[in-house]
Amino acid sequence: MALNFSRRLLAKLAGLSALGLAMPAAAAERKGKPAQDRFVPAAFPKAFVWGTATSSYQIEGAVNEDGRGPSIWDTFSHTAGKIADHSNGDRANEHYHRYREDVQLIKRLGARAYRFSIAWPRVFPDGTGTPNPKGLDFYNRLIDQLLANGIEPYATLYHWDLPQALEDRAGGWRSSDTSKAFGDYAGHVAARISDRVKNIFTINEAGRFLNFGYGWGIDAPGLKLPAAELNQARHNVVLGHGLAVQAIRAAARKGTRVGPAENIAACVPAFATPEHIRATEMATRELNAGLLGVMLEGKYTDGFLEYAGKDAPKFTAEELKIIGAKNDFVGLNIYAPQFYIAASDKKPGWAVLPFPSSFPHMNSEWLHIGPEVIYWAPKIAAKIWNIDTIYISENGTSSEDKLRDDGKVYDLDRISFLRNYLAQLQRATSEGVPVKGYFLWSLMDNFEWIFGYEKRFGLYHVDFQTQVRTPKLSTEFFRDVVARNAIGP
Ligand code: BG6
């Protein structure tokens, strides 16, 4: 019977091939067809960039070495009651000294790109003024090490570690002096790394650090500003982005590409009918109007200004021009659906649906599981802002990540999360959504801000006592996706 069955199957396959239809990959291989000609059902575009991401304060440690100045996160994490496990980033992953070993971790994934951030207070310990050459020396060593191992560096200039001096002297992002200082710092760095670093992200997740740090007092610097001041701080941040783009264009080598890395307020249509999709496009534009929207349009929407009313930021036409300068790419950090949107008969024509408390989430409560968000958010962003190059600058998840007695971490929930999200991302690229790359957060477990070391997002497990890095099961999953440039079958 088994023999008959396989004979029938063979006969069927032979028939298919006689008709010129696709054969399963294994059969194609036997016929000696080159690998790239085989039909891969869920392939990403050619030259798709695969990488992982980290940030300076979360992994470097060495906070008092080689002339680094303090940042607002040093101050904040050393303030009693701010960090869940009472920890701080003083030591973190000791990446400052272990970067060579860490580059090998990247290499083992087969990923050819790496997104890291540069600590502003290492380069300008005082925020402005005299640079500290030893600060950039570290990043030069890291960049050289990456390139020597065939890994393309993607640098982020601001991942929340603002020099404390600027907070003290200027009130941090409450003042446009900080925007100007950021522009100067960006130009200084770009002039010195753009011979080797071709892609620079300006500011990471303005939407997160402004709301959490300046609005709700949860992140550094722990402020709860009234609405008008918060909107002004938002404006100063986007102005900082624009000034940085300008400074990079002036100082960097020709061909250096620049853009933001923003946690877009990610909207998903409640269901995919044309009217809900249209409503979701309108909602995406309005809900992002204060940050990503003004960076991409060079203006605040009428809806945003009307809603802000007397609390709207003060700005000039000249500033809007700077803020709206063309980017070479847009980085989107996408973890969870933030808003499910439905069409509405009432103004403005869309409504945010309430989140049920039973909505499933990962090991972080905020991380709702909605893989379709990584399909819809880039698709809608590309359409409404006419973007031609998008990177998923962060995506990933926390997991329990227990190191078992056999020395392994079976992070099956992370694998399931990644498989589902990447399938939706592939769906987007297969429809022509211009996503050119993906950076997984994170290369290794690290200091997860207010959660300290209690939340683990890494592909590699880190024992923070011994600093031993152990690959989790998900490293094998990710390596396979990268190697085949495809998800599935
Ligand atoms: C992103 C940040 O918001 O998400 C990362 O850019 C951060 O720096 C990651 O580590 C996870 O967030 P959290 O708040 O759970 O640590």
Image (cartoon, rainbow, N blue to C red):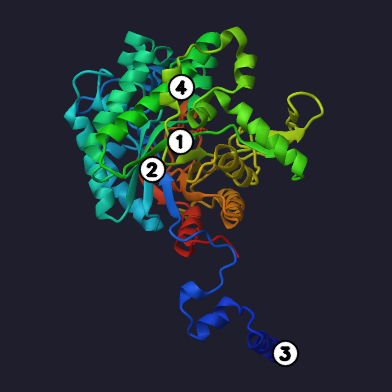
Q: Position of residue 85 (x, y in %)?
A: 48, 26
Q: Nearer the viewer, residue 7 or 452?
A: 7
Q: CA distance from mark 1 to mark 3?
A: 54 Å
Crowd tier of the residue under label 1, counting other residues whose Cα lies within 10 Å: few below 14, some 14–19, many 20 or above = many
Q: Is residue 88 visible?
A: no
For disc 1, the marked residue is 261
Q: Is mark 2 within 8 Å of ligand 1?
A: no
**SS of the residue under disc 4:** helix
Dot 2 or dot 4: first in sequence order is 2
CB-based contact (under 8 Å), mark 1 and mark 2: yes
For disc 4, the marked residue is 320
CB-based contact (under 8 Å), mark 3 and mark 4: no
Relative to 355, 206 lies left or right: left
Q: Position of residue 281 (x, y in %)?
A: 66, 36
Q: Is mark 3 within 8 Å of ligand 1?
A: no
Q: Nearer the viewer, residue 356 or 454?
A: 356
Q: Residue furthest right?
A: 345
Dot 1 or dot 3: first in sequence order is 3
**SS of the residue under disc 3:** helix
Q: Is residue 417 above or below residue 324?
A: below
Circle 3 or circle 4, nearest the eye? 4
**SS of the residue under disc 2:** strand
Q: Is mark 1 within 8 Å of ligand 1?
A: yes
Dot 3 or dot 4: first in sequence order is 3
Specify the quadrant that holds the N terminus.
bottom right
For disc 2, the marked residue is 115
Task: Say which amino acid is labelled 3.
Answer: Arg
| Residue shown at 47% from the left, 15% from the top | 233
Circle 1 or circle 3, nearest the eye? 1
